[in-house]
Image (cartoon, grey):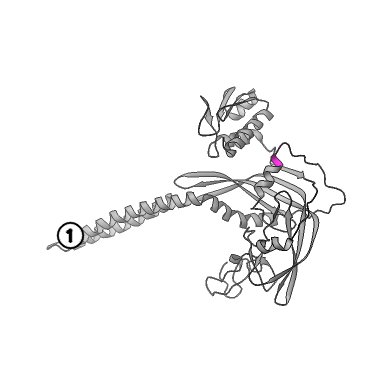
Amino acid sequence: MTPSSRRLREFAAGVLAEAGALVERLEPEGLEALLPAPVQQALQTPDWLRLGFAAELPPAAQRVSLESEWLTRLGGLLGARGRRATCVWPMVLPPLPQPERLLEHGLILHNAVYRLSGVRPAWTRYRLLVCRYSAISDEKREGIITFGINLATGSALDPFVDVLLAAVADDATPLEASVPSEVELPPDWPVARLHACLTRALPARVRAHLQPFISGMQRRLDRDLAQVFEYYSGLRQEAWQRLQRPGADAAREQVRLEAAEREYHAKVADLRQKYALRVTVELSQTLELLMPVQRLNLLIRRRKGERQIAMDWNPLARKLEPPPCEWSSTAEVTRLVCDEALHLVSPPAQAPCTQCSRAYCRVCHPRQCPKCGQAG
């Protein structure tokens, strides 16, 4: 049984049991449940239910996968429960030897220098998000994407967000209910700031998840466009050949050529509409994780300017978080520092303008190039 199918089965078993059903796990890779009347009504199913979660199904089982409607049904049964949670994870912080070595691989500045000014224990506030995406073109794909952000430093947690979620989901993990009184936590982000972060961060991550699907869709589009082009090129060639014959009706052949041209462009437009990709992303769960970290304080210098930033080392994953990108929250480690406000950004966020070729910071100028006014 794969980890994903096992998680799906345990999720379904937990939701059904919480709703009052009698649940029993079956091999291979399934479960059956006896449902009370309210659950039958909510799921639109008889009182006895058998589900399967992998390639091999138990007899008479209905398949449950990320693409099936069963996740939507079970989500409806769950309602608003489990959508948002807060966990506190106190632990003894291990020492952090050789932080300079961590920074050598964890931060690359192309146009500035940095100096480690200190390492100290601290607490942070992680926002971990589980989102469900749906992509519809000539086919449909659905999936789950996880995203995490450190609200103290602004770092994205791509290298170990799944490690944190798995640790919290482990039933054997002891989670305390409150933060020690002497701890100073970073403030929560306003909704507008979090929304802006997700708007810029999620598209690239969803695109990476969908890359095989997009590549297959592009191959099918190219194939169909080639077939349409070949067909109408043949019609055009035949019309030209008829025009070369003695006594050919030039006016009639010209009408045929123009009609074929119109039909070709209409077919191409239909294909582009058929293969147009529409992607929706829905937030499924939000987890706030409060825990101690080792905080590395850095002094960034760019020409005559300087500023302080922080990067956290997570003791659960035993990894240094990626440096913050104040524009796109990318998890790559290469950064540039802008001249105007010393914003720390990834190279695409300080790329040259497509019209005047001037490089500029998208945090300072999010809407348009400051030199020529070209939309960013």
Quadrant housing the C terminus = bottom right
Relative image position of residue 147 (x, y in whole percent): 64, 50
Classed neighbour count for the residue bearing mark 1: other residues with Cα under 10 Å, few (<14), some (14–19), many (≥20): some
Secondary structure found at label 1: helix
Residue 248 relative to residue 293: left or right: left
Count of numbered circles on the image: 1
Q: In the depicted view, which residue is nearer to us: 256 or 221?
A: 221
Residue range corresponding to the magenta coloring? 168-179
For disc 1, the marked residue is 242
The reply to whether residue 325 is in sight is no
User: Which residue is at the far front?
Assistant: 97
Relative image position of residue 26 (x, y in whole percent): 58, 26
Relative image position of residue 153 (x, y in whole percent): 73, 59
Relative image position of residue 244 (x, y in whole percent): 16, 64
Task: Name the residue at 75% across, 58% down.
Answer: 97
Residue 212 relative to residue 36: left or right: left
User: Which residue is at the far left?
Assistant: 246
The reply to whether residue 292 is in sight is yes
Three-letter amino acid code of the residue under disc 1: Arg
Q: In the depicted view, which residue is nearer to us: 87 or 21?
A: 87
Q: Is residue 150 above or below residue 353?
A: above
Q: For residue 172: magenta?
A: yes
Q: Main secondary structure of the magenta part?
A: loop
Quadrant housing the N terminus = top right
Task: Name the residue at 67% across, 46% down.
Answer: 163
